């Protein structure tokens, strides 16, 4: 079966399962997707399908590449609470693909995904806090999210933590050298 036919079939499945899950979807934003799936397995299936369709649209797999359409599919799944879609939607906002570039929106969606242990969202959120893009610069929060990502195996997060620690130690030394000693 061609990928485009697969996407069309997936879209039909999504639209039919949305009807059964729509009553639950409003509550799903406040619960984790896993909690939602235990009540409505169709909701989890719907979110995964929507994310997959968004991925095909973003990458141009079997369909013409369309970032705006990808963002719409990611947003549907992200609003249900699907962590991978929240991460993907954050990427769309970070790079301005299919949506206006907005670091604050990227941070918001990555925060939601990071709280569901999506390692790449934790890493990227740490980067935003380190750089102060879309959020107030906060090295402590950067270190927190990089530590979480490192715990899930993101090697670059470990490197970033080491660099941050070295930088902080250097700055503390410089402050100490400039601070007069009073008897």
Image (spheres, grey):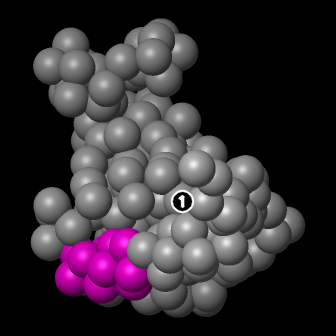
**Rendered location of residue 73, percent (x, y):** 56, 55
Magenta stretch encompasses residue 39 = no
Q: What type of secondary structure mainly makes up the magenta span? A: helix
**Rendered location of residue 11, percent (x, y):** 45, 54
The residue most toward the right is 100
Residue 127 vertical placement versus 26 (above, below): below
Residue 27 vertical placement versus 168 (above, below): above
**Rendered image quadrant of residue 97:** bottom right
**Rendered image quadrant of residue 169:** bottom left
Left or right side of 41 for 177: right
The residue shown at (58%, 50%) is 183
**Rendered image quadrant of residue 96:** bottom right
The residue shown at (61%, 60%) is 181
**Rendered location of residue 75, percent (x, y):** 59, 48
Label 1 sits on a secondary structure element that is: helix
Left or right side of 176 for 37: left
> Which one is nearer the viewer's eye here, 151 or 170?
170
Left or right side of 53 for 91: right
> Which residue was labeled with disc 1?
139
Magenta stretch encompasses residue 156 = yes
Is any part of residue 170 visible from this angle? yes
**Dot 1 alpha-carbon crowd within 10 angstroms: few under 14, some 14 to 19, many 20 or more:** many
> Which one is nearer the viewer's eye here, 162 or 96?
162
**Which quarter shows the N terminus?**
bottom left
Provide the residue span drawn in magenta.
154-166
Left or right side of 9 for 104: right
Is any part of residue 46 visible from this angle? no
């Amino acid at each position: 079966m061609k990928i485009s036919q697969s996407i069309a079939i997936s879209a039909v499945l999504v639209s039919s399962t949305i009807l059964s899950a729509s009553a639950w979807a409003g509550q799903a934003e406040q619960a984790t997707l896993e909690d939602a799936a235990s009540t409505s397995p169709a909701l989890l299936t719907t979110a995964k399908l929507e994310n997959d369709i968004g991925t095909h649209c973003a990458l141009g797999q079997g369909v013409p590449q369309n970032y705006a359409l990808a963002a719409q599919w990611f947003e549907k799944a992200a609003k249900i609470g699907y962590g991978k879609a929240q991460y993907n939607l954050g990427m769309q906002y970070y790079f301005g693909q299919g949506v206006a570039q907005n670091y604050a929106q990227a941070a918001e969606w990555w925060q939601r995904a990071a709280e569901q242990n999506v390692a790449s969202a934790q890493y990227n959120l740490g980067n935003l806090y380190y750089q102060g893009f879309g959020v107030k610069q906060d090295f402590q929060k950067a270190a927190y999210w990089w530590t979480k990502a490192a715990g899930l195996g993101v090697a670059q997060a470990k490197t970033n933590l080491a660099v941050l620690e070295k930088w902080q130690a250097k700055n503390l030394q410089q402050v100490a050298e400039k601070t007069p000693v009073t008897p």
